[in-house]
Image (cartoon, rainbow, N blue to C red):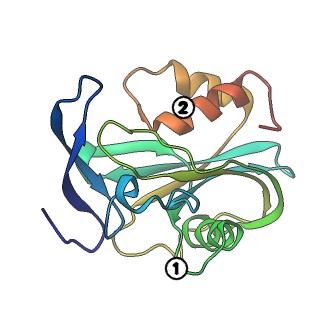
Amino acid sequence: MTTGRWLNLFDVNYIDRTGEEKSWQIVTRQKEPKCISGNYRQPDAVVIVPYHAVENKMVLLREYRVPLNGYEYGFPAGLVDPGESVEQATRRELMEETGLTVRRFIKISPPIYSSAGMTDESVAMVYVECEGTPSTRKNTASELIEILRVSSAEAQELLKDTTLKFDAKAWLAISRFAEGNHST
């Protein structure tokens, strides 16, 4: 239905469990939906959960998001470029969005899906220990990002504020950190 640079809309036909032909509209980042190509192995993007061990704090972003007409709390994230590994994309995106560097990789998820009712987009959740001084110097013109470093107690306070908008994946990871789990 569309052939955009970042997103494409498809009308996919399928047979439901009663044998009736149906249609479902989905958005994908690929040239064709994964349900057609079968290419589920490589995630489309990385979501980086950075822990600054020297400061004993989680690194969060407060970033302006056009669809929300406001700021969302989340993590550094970005698309995996063609031929790039998850680790390479993680290092690049963390540096571009926060100025921080990966000290070590803690855990990398397989491709996971957060809105399978409308998109086949997958991300790898990448937990890292990072180091350095935060900077937005390498942000693109379209990125309006504030870098936050929060303790477990500060994370608990953020989560209590029901007026804030959180990325779903970030809310889960921040909740675990707020509970004192600093390794995942």
Query: Where's residue 117, x and y in %?
Result: 32, 36
Mark with earlier residue (2, 1)? 1
Snapshot quadrant of residue 32: bottom left
Question: Looking at the image, can residue 65 be seen?
Answer: yes
At a point 56% along the width and 49% down the height, the residue shown is 75
Amino acid bearing label 2: Trp
Tag shown at residue 171: 2
At a point 15% along the width and 66% down the height, the residue shown is 2
Locate residue 1 relative to residue 42 in the image: left or right: left
At a point 46% along the width and 21% down the height, the residue shown is 161
Depth order, front residue of 180/29: 29
Which quadrant would the C terminus be assigned to in this image?
A: top right
Which quadrant would the N terminus be assigned to in this image?
A: bottom left
Number of other residues with Cα within 10 Å of mark 2, as a class: few under 14, some 14 to 19, many 20 or more: some
Residue highlighted by disc 1: 82
Q: Secondary structure at mark 2?
A: helix
- Above or below, 166 relative to 11: above
> Disc 2 versus disc 1: distance between alpha carbons?
29 Å
Query: Where's residue 149, x and y in %?
Result: 66, 46
Amino acid bearing label 1: Pro
Question: Looking at the image, can residue 69 be seen?
Answer: no
- Which callout, 2 or 1, points to the residue nearer the camera? 1
Depth order, front residue of 16/177: 16
